[in-house]
Amino acid sequence: MAGGSDAPFSIPVSSRIQRLPPYLFARINALKAEKRRAGHDIIDLGMGNPIDPSPDFVVEKLAEAAHDARNHRYSASVGIFNLRREVALKYKRKYGVELDPEKEIVVTIGSKEGFSHLMLAMLGAGDTVVVGDPAYPIHVYAVALAGGNVISVKLGNDEAFLERIEHVLRNLFPRPKLVILNYPHNPAAMTVEPLFYQQAVALARQYGVLLINDFAYGETCFDSYRAPSFLAAPGAKEVGVEFSTMSKPYNMAGWRVGFCCGNSEMVRALSTIKGYYDYGHFQPIQIASILALRKGDDFVASQSLVYQKRRDVLVSGLRKLGWEVEVPRASMFVWAKVDPKHLAGEGTIDFALRLIENADVALAPGRGFGESGEGFMRIALVENELRIKQALRQMDAYLNGRKKHQRPSAYSGDRQMSSPPSDQPVI
Ligand SMILES: Cc1ncc(COP(=O)(O)O)c(C=O)c1O
């Protein structure tokens, strides 16, 4: 070949990719995969990926609709009207919220896609966004990918948290454009009452900032708690939107159906971006989702009860281990403060590696969700009660000294991948 050079050909990826913060779960995922390849049965309470099946009647509808050739064409990027109308009916039924399916609802390819593209629709280079710390990582990554800057504020679910946000809004210039809320929270499982959203809306109006609530766990509630919708706060639609999803309440994570509802300008901005990027879901998925929304209330309630029972087993076991745990009222997670004697001076990322190596149990280290997560582990309710009990026994045997301590084989104190692997899992 003519004109060749021995120098390695360089592939200049965009600065957008280079702006991504380090992916702190990479070493954990690598070790988990290595142990599994070596034949270990790792009990994985690390990822928030539901293990229980989607409702049968929804799967059947999907199959039926898939046999109809009229459903094989490109669909609508904002979602078919009947699905948006069903979302409006559900918001009305559950939360008393009126939504116009034409202007105030867009169907997204999971709420993660919707959130990410909304950031692209709303942010320009240098815009700032206030995010609680710890946070679900996409709330940070999507801002970075859209060219924005994140201002982290120590997370809370009360007036003190809103005061911390207000302090930033008052003192930062140019003023932040968006505030991201997420209740019930991932990873901290915090919940709020309606008054919180009323105060947040007042703050948004006072400072001219927009609000986004990630309501992914809005229907995964325990005992008598019912998570309020942000959109039920008076004036919420003037200042923001809420994301919801089929993934968690209906065990439809792989189907990738979410919704962005509320402020019509923000919904329009997201719809515009989606109109350029995608053609919407395979229509049978949308048709089956309509049925899930219409007939799935009992399914959602019984799935929440499954998580509630797992929560009870987990909370009591962790307390016996000596970890500090608040009983969560919602979400798929328990957020536990590790007994310092178990941490033995290490950070939670190294601790998580040790647990995989020595106890065959994978948990998500709090540090992976932000600096304020250090000292905590997030434990997802995604194994059955027997497996959760087994995981607790294995942790007890290792942490309370009845099993020899080993350094993880993939352990490397200084190795840290700076970008996610291409098959980045759910966290
Ligand atoms: C807070 C939060 N938002 C959004 C998502 C993603 O949901 P979806 O499957 O709708 O993209 C998750 C998934 O774990 C989550 O925890």
Image (spheres, helix red, strand yellow):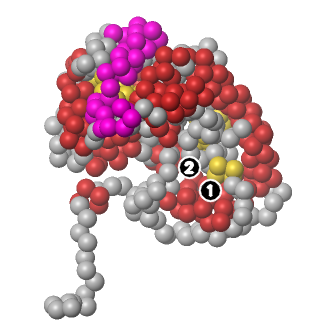
The tag on residue 365 is 2
Q: What element carries label 1?
A: helix
On screen, 421 above or below 137? below
* Residue at screen point 24% across, 19% down: 103
Q: Is residue 259 visible?
A: yes
Q: Please report contact status of discs 1 and 2: CB closer than 8 Å, yes or no.
A: yes
Residue neighbourhood size for the residue with mark 1, other residues' Cα within 10 Å, grouped as few (<14), some (14–19), many (≥20)? many
Measure the C-alpha gap from mark 1 to mark 2.
8 Å
* Residue at screen point 84% across, 57% down: 402
Q: Is residue 312 magenta?
A: no
On screen, 391 above or below 355? above
Give, as a single range, the part of the protein colored magenta: 69-98
Please name the amino acid that badge 2 sits on: Pro
Q: Earlier in the sequence, mark 1 or mark 2?
A: 1
Question: Assess mark 1: CB under 8 A from ligand 1?
Answer: no
* Residue at screen point 28% across, 49% down: 145
Q: In this view, which residue lies farthest toward the right?
A: 402
* Residue at mark 1: 351
